[in-house]
Image (tube, rainbow, N blue to C red):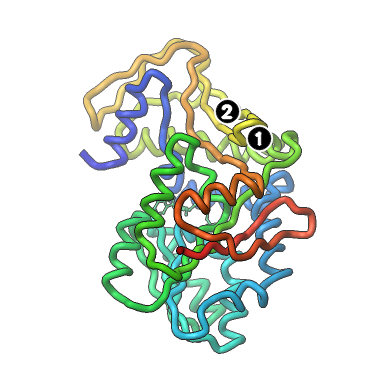
Amino acid sequence: MNSFLNDTVQGLRAADKYLLSKYFYDEAGDRLFQQIMNLEEYYLSRAEREVFELNRKAICDHFPSEGFRLAELGAGDGVKTLVLLEELIKQKRNFTYNPIDISGNALDLLAANLKAKLPDLAFEGMEAEYFEALQKLSTQTDQPLVLLFLGSNIGNFRRDNVDVFMDKLSSSLRRGDQLLIGVDLKKNPNLILGAYNDSRGVTAAFNFNILKRINRELDGNFDLSKFRHYNTYDPHTGESRSFLISLADQEIHLGAAQESFTINAFEAIHTETSRKYSKADLKDLAEKHGFKVSADFRDGSNLFTDQIWERL
Ligand SMILES: C[S@@+](CC[C@H](N)C(=O)[O-])C[C@H]1O[C@@H](n2cnc3c(N)ncnc32)[C@H](O)[C@@H]1O
């Protein structure tokens, strides 16, 4: 059974149903996410871009002075990364860029963009899961690693599994390697709620795309008109969560698994967590997993932080 099918079956069998957000990103999902990044309500991408524009030199000054690898987990369209890549090329720094993404489509678009805009850049895309790619990189090179993990992707891990991910990440790095981690900060809850439920319905369409993908790739029969997009934010845990709420009692059949699932009226399928952090939360997380926070860069409105963590 492939992992999309296996994960989907596990999620639909669970008492609290869920689907994994990494499966949002097929070609349509990549396109919708690009639209999300341009939405008025979705402040995250603009804020992180501003962090880079305001601090590009100071950020790059932290990177190793000798040759290094610049790898990026979940690079997507890499638009914000371009700001740093331009700065590094301007400074004539010796590095190779390795964007890592499970979406081959996203990597193809990124490669075309990089070739057009930065013809002097040495880069090699890796179509793989995060840890598979990091493992491969570590066998390829002894150069120090600077790992980019932007867009508050760390927020996609729930409180109960972020530690597992961070342990794995920490043990994939060597002493002295750096992590540049971009994280959405805890803030006015209404601003956060709006970012995941915009007035034009693009975030809702993105959420529904996972059902369309299941229908197409796993021979599912989800009727999209029988679901509603719904999102919440808990200021204590910092968890913003998105759901698809069933509007009726229904039976879903997955042809690829030869299995049916009962979903009751108003039962929820959890689809995405986007957890927000405070500065103190981040310090705790870094120290718990063997990192030291060496720098903290902000946008002008303090919505978003990009921190440099050094692996101790
Ligand atoms: C929300 S987008 C963010 C893109 C970019 N980092 C940014 O900040 O705009 C997440 C990207 O990570 C990729 N991704 C998600 N989970 C992944 C995983 N486990 N392994 C590799 N790539 C993953 C997706 O395909 C998608 O392109």
Q: Identify residue type, mark 2.
A: His
Mark 1 vs mark 2, CA separation in Å: 8 Å
Q: Residue furthest bottom?
A: 92
What quarter of the picture does the N terminus occupy? top left
Q: Residues within 10 Å of mark 2 (few under 14, many from 20)?
A: many
Residue that lies at the very extreme toward the right in this rendered image: 301
- What is the number of the mark on residue 229? 2
Front-most of residues 208 and 133: 133
At 61% across and 78% down in the image, what residue appears?
Answer: 61
Residue 57 location (% of width, % of height): 67, 77
Instruction: Say which quarter of the image contains residue 133.
Output: bottom left
Q: How many marks?
A: 2
198 or 237, which is in the foreground? 237
Q: Position of residue 118 (x, y in %)?
A: 54, 81
Name the residue located 60 percent from the left edge and 52 percent from the top edge. Answer: 183
Pointer 1 and pointer 2: residues touching (CB < 8 Å)?
yes
Q: Is residue 48 above or below residue 266?
A: below
What secondary structure is marked by label 2? strand
Q: Which quarter of the image is occupied by the C terminus?
A: bottom left
Q: Amino acid at mark 1?
A: Asn
| Residue 220 sits in quarter | top left
